[in-house]
Image (cartoon, coloured by chain):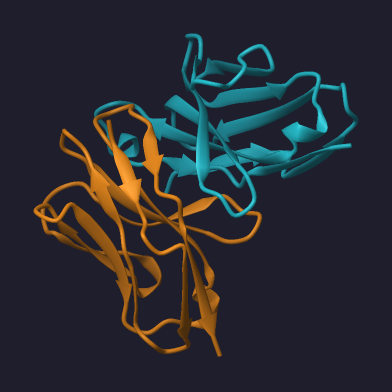
Amino acid sequence: GAVVSQHPSRVICKSGTSVKIECRSLDFQATTMFWYRQFPKKSLMLMATSNEGSKATYEQGVEKDKFLINHASLTLSTLTVTSAHPEDSSFYICSARGVTGTDLNTEAFFGQGTRLTVV
Amino acid sequence: AQSVTQLDSQVPVFEEAPVELRCNYSSSVSVYLFWYVQYPNQGLQLLLKYLSGSTLVKGINGFEAEFNKSQTSFHLRKPSVHISDTAEYFCAVSGDYGQNFVFGPGTRLSVLP
């Protein structure tokens, strides 16, 4: 099956610094990638949708200047949490869909998630 | 707009007993339906999906789900659960190509010895 690798799995950073999270589709081309945030014992909250080569579409209430998303290639998307604060501590998960019209587009493949702790 | 409801936030069940996790959705267009499982501090793993065809879908780990269009439901079932099935289960709906997945709030399945 299609594999999505998310790195790092855990990161601790100081308040005020920036953190970059990578999401890679290892064996398929991902035209669309999604970034989610998950609070403890809660469902996934969509933060933004990114299509390769274009600007990400952010959900209402998500600060695009704080959560920078780049999808520069068909296999890599990055989420950068800028000037992180303790309230940004959360579990972040990416997912990817393959090229439109292929079987890899009919489902989303998820990364392992990144546990971000801001101290 | 699409939405997903999972009426049971927690489902405790004894080992080897059957279980059903309920999922209802609303959508104005044709949908794809999914069940994902999440173990602690991990991403989501696909259990099964319905795209078209037979309404009874079989997935991994002995799970199955039945798509009922008239009741807009996609309930997940397993005839005999194991301790290792303890996890969070999410029902999701997606529309046409490239659209986002809309997730339900999740159901915590706890399998008791």
Q: Residue at x 61, y 14 (%)?
A: A64
Taking depth in this image into account, of B3 and A26 the one nearest to the observer is B3
As drawn, is A19 to the left or to the right of A74? right
Q: Indicate the quadrant containing the C terminus of chain B: top left, top right, bottom left or bottom right.
A: bottom right
Give the colour of chain A: cyan
- Residue A78 in the image: above or below residue B111: above
Taking depth in this image into account, of A76 and A14 the one nearest to the observer is A14
Taking depth in this image into account, of B18 and B61 the one nearest to the observer is B18
As drawn, is A4 to the left or to the right of A82? left
- Residue B9 in the image: above or below residue A38: below
Count the marks: 0
- Residue A15 in the image: above or below residue A55: below
Q: Residue pushed farthest top?
A: A54
Q: Indicate the quadrant containing the N terminus of chain B: top left, top right, bottom left or bottom right.
A: top left
Q: Residue at x 37, y 85 (%)?
A: B80
Q: Position of residue A39 (x, y in %)?
A: 63, 45
Q: Which chain is orange?
A: B
Q: Position of residue B60 (x, y in %)?
A: 37, 66
Q: Residue at x 42, y 81 (%)?
A: B81
Q: Position of residue A40 (x, y in %)?
A: 64, 51
Q: Position of residue B6 (x, y in %)?
A: 37, 56
